[in-house]
Image: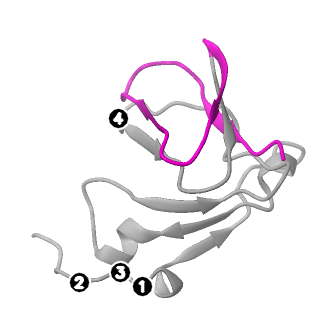
Amino acid sequence: MPGEFKGKIDKDKAPTKHGTGYPPPFDAPCKHRQRWKLGDAAGLTQFGVNLMRLPPGQWSSQRHWHSREDEFVWVLEGEVWLVTDAGEEKLVPGDCAGFPAGVPDGHHLQNRS
């Protein structure tokens, strides 16, 4: 059954998650991140949309990849470092990166400011 159309998404009313579910000590570089689950707020079920705020020194996650879901990153403000098997590169506002499902290239973002 299709989801219900919800119209405009109010970020401040979207489900929010602070921190991470990683156990210690793996939680340390991610425990101050904040994520707004915009896809959930819109009733989306086929893909997720998240807005993440990374305070200085924080990571988006531990390095990972997805076996069944693509992932897309779009930097809106500030700068982050994308870490992959190929190395590291800086992303600035307007930069994007994509990760196809099933490609075992562990990646994450770091705010090094």
Q: Measure the alpha-carbon separation of dots 2 and 1.
A: 10 Å
Q: Tell me the residue that label 3 is attached to.
A: 9
Secondary structure found at label 4: loop
For the residues bearing labels 2 and 3, Cβ distance under 8 angstroms: yes
Q: Tell me the residue that label 2 is attached to.
A: 6
- Residue extent of the magenta highlight: 85-113
Name the amino acid, label 4. Answer: Arg
Q: Nearer the viewer, residue 94 or 27?
A: 94
Q: Position of residue 13 (x, y in %)?
A: 48, 87
Q: Tell me the residue that label 4 is attached to.
A: 68
| Residue depth check, mark 4 versus mark 1: number of the one nearer the observer | 1
Name the amino acid, label 1. Answer: Asp
Q: Position of residue 23 (x, y in %)?
A: 80, 49
Instruction: Classify residue 33 by image quadrant.
Output: bottom right
- Earlier along the polypeptide chain: callout 3 or callout 4? 3
- Earlier along the polypeptide chain: callout 4 or callout 1? 1
Q: Tell me the residue that label 1 is attached to.
A: 10
Count of labels in the image = 4
Which part of the image, by quadrant, shows the N terminus? bottom left
For the residues bearing labels 3 and 4, Cβ distance under 8 angstroms: no
Secondary structure found at label 3: loop
| Residue depth check, mark 3 versus mark 4: number of the one nearer the observer | 3
- Relative side of 20 to 77, left or right: right
Mark 3: give few (<14), some (14-19) or many (20+) Cα within 10 Å: few
Q: Residue at x 42, y 85 (%)?
A: 10
Name the amino acid, label 3. Answer: Ile
Q: Position of residue 76 (x, y in %)?
A: 53, 56
Q: Position of residue 99 (x, y in %)?
A: 42, 30
Q: Measure the alpha-carbon separation of dots 3 and 1.
A: 4 Å
